[in-house]
Image (tube, grey):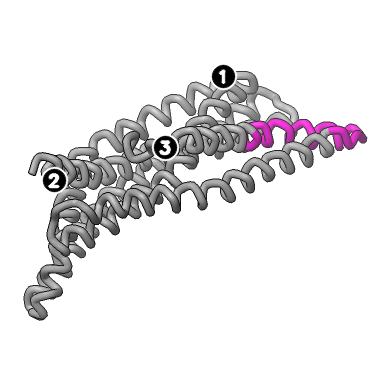
Amino acid sequence: MWQMLQGYRARVGLSLFLVVAEAAGAVVVPFVLGLALTDYADGSNRGLILLAATGLVTMVFATVRRLHDVRLYSQIYQRAGETAFAQEAGLSEKTARLNMLREVVDFLEHSMPALVGSISGYIGTLVFLALLSVPVLIGALVMSALIVLIYAASSRRTVAFNRGYNDEYERQVDVLGRNDSTLTRRHIGLMNSWTIKLSDVDTINFALSLTLTVALQVFAIVSSTRQGMDEGTLLSVVLYVFEVSAAASYLPASWQEYLRLRDILQRLNNQTSVAATS
């Protein structure tokens, strides 16, 4: 993937800088919201002005990044697609790999910024939770560790299912080209089978992770209330718990997506190596 970004790395770095800036704004919002609520209850609009300014600046970063990214990754896909099509392979493999390459570029354009933003937001959220409530911080760390273990336990199956799905996908054009209804039905059945297996793993992981996040949210409310926090601080803590719960669920799911992309990139790289030695 690093090699595919050659010639575009500075622009990708700019995109990631904007992602971090956007994530920083999102992390600050719950804290500023708590201040705004407290200030307004005391008859001051200072917190509301700060909240509005934070939101507007974050919006500018997000807008500029999206305008920049759609143009950047369109260029990357065009160049990478031309390289993939020039490789020595059958029409079925070329068609499948060109579509797979679209997944890689979509990951770079959409998932990678979301991943970097989630990591930045996760770290920033933990910092604010450490300032607001140490017991809730510890609960968030325990929840995160358990979610990571859940996804790590399913990584081997995810790799195997993705490999089976991609193997069958690469045969698609050849199967359809034979115009045989029996072979086509079998091909579609196998594709559906691999898709269902992957979905079942994701669903189980999601259900277990969601259960842990709900437990953390309940714990945060009870713990913060017992600490005698004012309404503004309590609201900030609850919002940060929602943020850390979302990030803790998203980060391991991104690992699952990476496992699929790793198989795709191995296929493309292996084919490039074969073409170079022939």
Residue at mark 3? 7
> Label 2 sits on what residue type?
Ala
What residue appears at the point 45 percent right and 53 percent down from the top-left corner? 74
**Quadrant where the image shows the N terminus:** top left
Q: Nearer the viewer, mark 1 or mark 3?
A: 3
Left or right side of 62 for 1: left
Q: Position of residue 8 (x, y in %)?
A: 44, 38
What residue appears at the point 67 percent right and 40 percent down from the top-left corner? 58
Determine whether the residue tagged by mark 3 lies in a helix, strand or loop. loop
Q: Residues within 10 Å of mark 1 (few under 14, many from 20)?
A: some
> Label 3 sits on what residue type?
Gly
Q: Is residue 19 magenta?
A: no
Where 166 sits versus 247, above or below?
below
> Label 1 sits on what residue type?
Val
Q: Considering only order in the chain, which callout, 3 or 1, is on the residue closer to the N terminus?
A: 3
Residue at mark 2? 275
Q: Considering only order in the chain, which callout, 3 or 2, is on the residue closer to the N terminus?
A: 3
Q: In terms of image quadrants, where is residue 96?
A: bottom left
Q: Is residue 238 visible?
A: no
| Magenta stretch bounds | 25-46
Do labels 1 and 3 touch, CB within 8 Å?
Answer: no
What residue appears at the point 41 percent right and 37 percent down from the top-left corner? 7
Q: Residues within 10 Å of mark 3 (few under 14, many from 20)?
A: few
Q: In terms of image quadrants, where is residue 143?
A: top left
Do labels 2 and 1 touch, CB within 8 Å?
Answer: no
Q: Closest to the observer: 177 or 44? A: 177
Left or right side of 200 for 122: right
Residue at mark 1? 134
Where 274 sits versus 137, above or below?
below
CA–CA distance between discs 2 and 3?
Answer: 23 Å
Q: Position of residue 93 (x, y in %)?
A: 17, 58
